[in-house]
């Protein structure tokens, strides 16, 4: 699976999040429109299916309880907010805070050198000089053209 992260490093460091936390938050950020959502006290919350998250974030190599504890820590650090909604059972829903939005504010901080967007390298061989041109581009434009002549 190809994965691209885009986050504000300065805000992430201020919020004291680990790289595992960034992966979890990024997954939530990119997929929240697919989650069941509810409004409570005028705030929008999303139900997170822990099993589905773990299936999609295999690289974390953690158990459901560890994911729960990481989400709880993100709430303690005021990156996410949590509420329990009861409807034929009790369900944990999570909402976004101002800190969350600052970490993933790509609209206002695109020119910031602290926003990270991991891209695949575009590597090509310059036939005239036999040297590599290694510039970065999106994975959609990835080209690997090598001159097979010695």
Image (cartoon, rainbow, N blue to C red):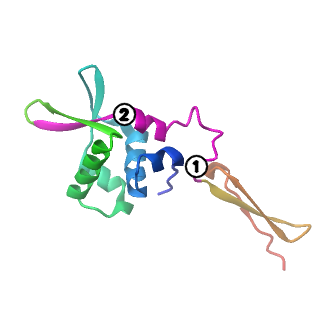
Residue 56 horizontal/vertical position (percent): 36, 53
Point out the residue furthest to the top here: 42
- 10 Å crowding of disc 2: few (<14), some (14-19), many (20+): few
Position of 119 compared to 28: left or right? right
Q: Which residues are magenta?
A: 90-118
Badge 1 crowding class, 10 Å Cα cut-off, few under 14, some 14 to 19, many 20 or more, is some
Q: How many marks?
A: 2
Q: Is residue 7 visible?
A: no
Name above or below for residue 101 compared with residue 55: above
Residue at the disc numbered 1: 117
The mark found on residue 59 in the picture is none
Residue that carries the numbered disc 2 in the rendered image: 97
Residue 42 part of the magenta segment: no
SS for tag 1? strand
Mark 2 falls on what kind of element? loop
Q: Residue at x 55, y 37 (%)?
A: 106
Give the mark nearest the N terminus, 1 or 2: 2
| Side of 133 where 16 appears, left or right | left
């Amino acid at each position: 699976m190809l994965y691209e992260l885009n986050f504000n490093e300065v805000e992430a460091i201020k919020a004291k999040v680990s790289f595992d936390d960034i992966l979890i938050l990024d997954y939530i950020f990119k997929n929240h429109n697919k989650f069941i959502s509810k409004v409570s006290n005028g705030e929008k919350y999303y139900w997170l299916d822990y099993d589905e998250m773990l299936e999609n974030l295999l690289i974390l190599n953690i158990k459901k309880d560890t994911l729960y504890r990481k989400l709880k820590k993100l709430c303690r650090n005021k990156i996410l907010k949590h509420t329990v909604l009861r409807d034929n059972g009790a369900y944990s829903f999570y909402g976004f805070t101002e800190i969350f939005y600052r970490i993933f504010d790509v609209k206002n901080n695109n020119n910031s050198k602290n926003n990270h967007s991991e891209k695949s390298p575009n590597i090509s061989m310059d036939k005239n000089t036999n040297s590599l041109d290694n510039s970065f581009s999106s994975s959609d434009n990835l080209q690997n053209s090598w001159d097979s002549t010695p």
